[in-house]
Image (spheres, helix red, strand yellow):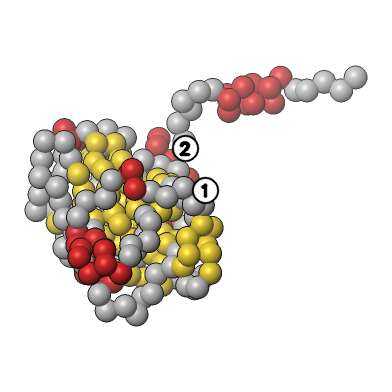
Amino acid sequence: MYRIPKSFLLLFALALLPGAEPSWKSKPIQQWNEADAKQVLGNSPWVKHAMPGLIPQQTEAQRREGGQMGGGQGVGVGIFGSANSYPGRGKAVPLEKLTVRWESAFPVRAAELKAQELAAPDWDGDFYAIAVYDVPGLKSGDRNLASDLKRAALLKRDGKKDLKPERVDILPQASGLTTVVYFFPRSDEITRDDKQIKLTAQIARLYVEQVFDTEEMVFQGKLQL
């Protein structure tokens, strides 16, 4: 009868241990390999996967009354439709989770370089930059789109004033989807004491809400945002 080596069983058991930390956490960034980088970009405290809500289509009268994007008014989760597809670009697009990545965090920027992500967003200036990837149904040629997206996004912290983006970049992808990058001012500093930071954003008829935990976003003893 074939016997499974004890060394293999030990390795398998270790792999199943709850709470086992990914390898990148215990290494300096300079020692990361491509696998470490892909772990950071795929599943880390700076990268989340949010299922957007679908906002019902407004009537012409509602658009005239509130202005495009609802006039910047807050959107409650109670108005989301239950549809699982988004009617973008003349055809239904399956509604899937969107990757929300804290782009300005140093571990993320380092991982993008190590993984050779040539399409990663780039910019100048001192911002908290957060990107929402693979957004369907946007028309990048719309002159008002960036200003509409800017009015309809916030970073929320308990007991503090909400942060509003100073600018929004719209980056078309070769797939026909879009990356939307929000730039929030660092002049209002986010600290570990803030505990949780919530991004809320309305993108056309999609509503995205994602929470980030500052305690989890510490690397090598420093909050990385």
Instruction: Quadrant for residue 223, please give it.
Output: top left
Does the CB distance between marks 1 and 2 fall below 8 Å?
Answer: yes
State whether residue 103 appears in this view.
Answer: no
Q: Say if 65 sits above or below 195 in the image.
A: below
Residue that label 1 marks:
35
- The local secondary structure at tag 1 comes to helix
Kind of residue at disc 1? Ala
Residue that label 2 marks:
23
Q: CA distance from mark 1 to mark 2?
A: 9 Å
- The local secondary structure at tag 2 comes to helix
Q: Nearer the viewer, residue 9 or 70?
A: 70
State whether residue 1 appears in this view.
Answer: yes
Q: Nearer the viewer, residue 29 or 127?
A: 127
Q: Say if 143 sits above or below 100 in the image.
A: below
Disc 1 packing (10 Å; few <14; some 14–19; many ≥20): some
Q: How many marks?
A: 2
Q: Nearer the viewer, residue 110 or 28?
A: 110
Instruction: Quadrant for residue 103, please give it.
Output: bottom left
